[in-house]
Amino acid sequence: MPASGLSAAALAARLYALGLLTRVEEHPRYTSVEAEVPESLSAESWREVLEVVAEADRFGLHATSLNGRTLWAVVRKAVPTTGDVGGPSHQR
């Protein structure tokens, strides 16, 4: 599992410990974590949740009257580095 996947899994585990059911998905450039947020989440729990997702590269909340509230966080995957970043026409 890439480092982003491990970081995302750690975020998901911490959110789960706070009582949120989470989903982790691998994407080509990032790993995402989503969690449904119950209406009954206390202010103290919100603070703890925000401390957790603040460690991600990006996070947000999607809220609708039909589907409730979904918290999301994204951990970017590292871009591989190569010795020939300029390509074949790059002059040194």
Image (cartoon, grey):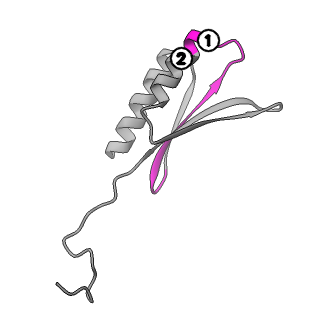
Q: Position of residue 83 (x, y in %)?
A: 18, 71
Residue placed under numbered mark 2 in the picture? 47
Residue placed under numbered mark 1 in the picture? 43
Evaluate if marks 1 and 2 touch, with contact meaning CB atoms under 8 Å apart. yes
Q: Is residue 23 above or below residue 85?
A: above
Q: Quadrant of the N terminus?
A: top left
List the single residue furthest toward the front: 92
Q: Which region shows up in magenta?
A: 27-45
**90 left or right of 7 in image:** left
Q: Is residue 74 above or below residue 82?
A: above
Q: Residue at x 34, y 59 (%)?
A: 79
Circle 2 packing at 10 Å, graded few (<14), some (14-19), many (20+), is few
Distance (Cα) linking label 1 and label 2 = 6 Å
Label 2 amino acid?
A: Arg
Q: Residue at x 57, y 36 (%)?
A: 72
Is residue 23 inside the magenta stretch? no
Determine whether the residue tagged by mark 1 lies in a helix, strand or loop.
helix
**20 left or right of 84 in image:** right
Label 1 amino acid?
A: Ala
